Image (cartoon, grey):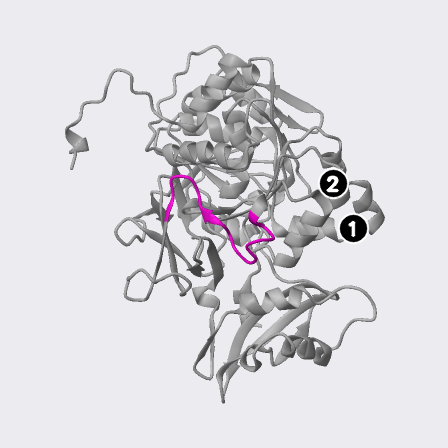
Amino acid sequence: MINTHALQVPETYRPLTVSSGVRTSALKYPDRVALRHGHVERTFRDLVKRIDALAIAAGTSLGLKPGQHIGILAPNCIAYIETVLALSDAGMPAVTLSARLNRAELTEVCNDACIRVLFVHPDCLNVAGSATFKTVEHQVVFGPEYESLLQSGVGAGFRPIAGEWDIFSIPFTSGTTGRPKGVMLPHRARALLFYAMAVEYGCFGPEDSFLAIAPLAHGAGLAFAIAPIFFGGTCELVTTFDASSVIGRLRDGRFTGVFMVPTHLHAILSLSDDVLTAHRNVALKSLISNAAPLSQRVKEQIVALWGDHLLHETYGSTEVGIACNIRPADQLRKQGSVGLAFPNCAIELRDPDGREVPANEIGELYTNSPFMFSGYWQQGGVRPPPLQGGWFSAGDLARKDDEGFIHVVDRKDDMVISGGLNIYPRQIEEVLYRHPQVAEAAVVGVSDEKWGERLRAHVVTRGQPAPDAEAIIAYCRDRLSGYKVPRDIVFVESLPKNATGKILKRSLRAQ
């Protein structure tokens, strides 16, 4: 075994950081548009000049030092990406905050993360102004104040000081299974993930243009927005998702790639048949779905609408980045699968004793790759990552078929034990999604004196007349074993979700 600590760093060594790709792209394509938002465009030359100036101003005008944290509270905008790139280059990782946070949530996260300077979009000033911060010393508002700060750093030379193991950003988990935690993502992990994404998806080359819809505050949203400019392509940011507008943008032929969460796809597929028919022809190379499970029925609808050559469903987590991807050719052939392991990623399915399970048996999914996080930031300090011999589990249960394809059956915490039998709600939800009048569904276990737990389905319907509970139960009974049929059906107007579209089952169980 090589003792890497004894090796000398060669003269040719260069840290692998997120900005390194953006900077080399600027050398090749200085006048190419890197970022676009509405009518505002930023060339690579201007982008690098601005992040250099902001990095200088952070130290001189704001008094920040390497290792200190900054926060960004804003919807998608160009200044968001500029701030992340600039401050991470200067060794000050950005805590990326959702623009949907309320006062209490913002206060908790900012105090937990020890944020020193908070960059705020004008739309978020009311929330930021009402919060009670313990560590925030300055608030910088995007707009004239931000531009003035940036100008204070113009003219001074800047050389990035961040190393590849330094932290690039700290997105906070959604808190679906407990208190939110800051996920510490090093430069090296993000940069290597970009290379794997470029290979797997084929839409991140210098001639590509990507439409970024997902919130930049989340790990995947930021990764899919920066990856295009890392390789010299163009990224266009969208602040507010509108299904009609987005499907029109995809039709105009400008974009070769787009990342969406299932909520976006549900909204697009809910448009009228006339609108969908008029937008069948798109120039996309890849449509990537992530953040929440995509039902097989929705996959079939997307293939029917746009063809069998572009849909990817990706499985991962904030902590591991991307672990699996199912490519377009396998979407209909491998039903319910999230595909094969991502490039340079290893996956094992283990039983409760830590032993790897055989093919077609269910085990907990563990990941090991160079894309993984460095640990958590919580309660004002670093918490080491919860690993088993270098492997991480996000708490999902899965099986591997004979061809090595991974099928996620459910979250470990969502599994229901009724009458001593293990039940995986995701299987039941797949059946419910095939009902012609079910738009969305979520199944949870609720306390039952006789069975321990019984199944309750929360259903969002479409069309008129709406089905009644007995009709839904009868539909399930024809397609599922008796013990898997929900005993209760609750009709709701919408399901509780986080900003990435993941259904908050904890909230449903609490109800």
Between 469 and 58, the residue placed more toward the observer is 469
Give the mark, 2 or 1, whose residue is nearer the N terminus. Answer: 2
Q: Magenta part mainly helix, strand or loop?
A: loop
Q: Identify residue for label 1.
A: 271
Q: Point out residue 369 in the picture as x, y percentages from the top left corner.
A: 36, 43
Q: Is residue 187 left or right of residue 251?
A: left
Q: Which residue is mark 2?
A: 247
Badge 2 marks a residue whose secondary structure is helix
Q: CA distance from mark 2 to mark 1?
A: 10 Å
Residue 91 inside the magenta-drawn segment: no
Q: Could one spot residue 172 in this view of the protein? A: no
Q: Nearer the viewer, residue 231 or 39?
A: 231
Q: Is residue 32 visible?
A: yes
Quadrant housing the C terminus: bottom right
Q: Amino acid at mark 2?
A: Ile
Spot occupied by residue 20 in the image (x, y as percentages of width and height): 42, 22
The residue stretch that appears in magenta: 330-346
Q: In this orientation, which residue lies closer to the viewer: 386 or 378?
A: 386
Residue under the image location 46 percent in, 33 percent down: 194
Based on the displayed image, in which of its 4 quarters is residue 400 positioned?
A: bottom left
- Examine the rendered structure and indicate whether residue 235 appears above or below residue 134: above
Query: In the displayed structure, would residue 18 be above or below residue 275?
Result: above
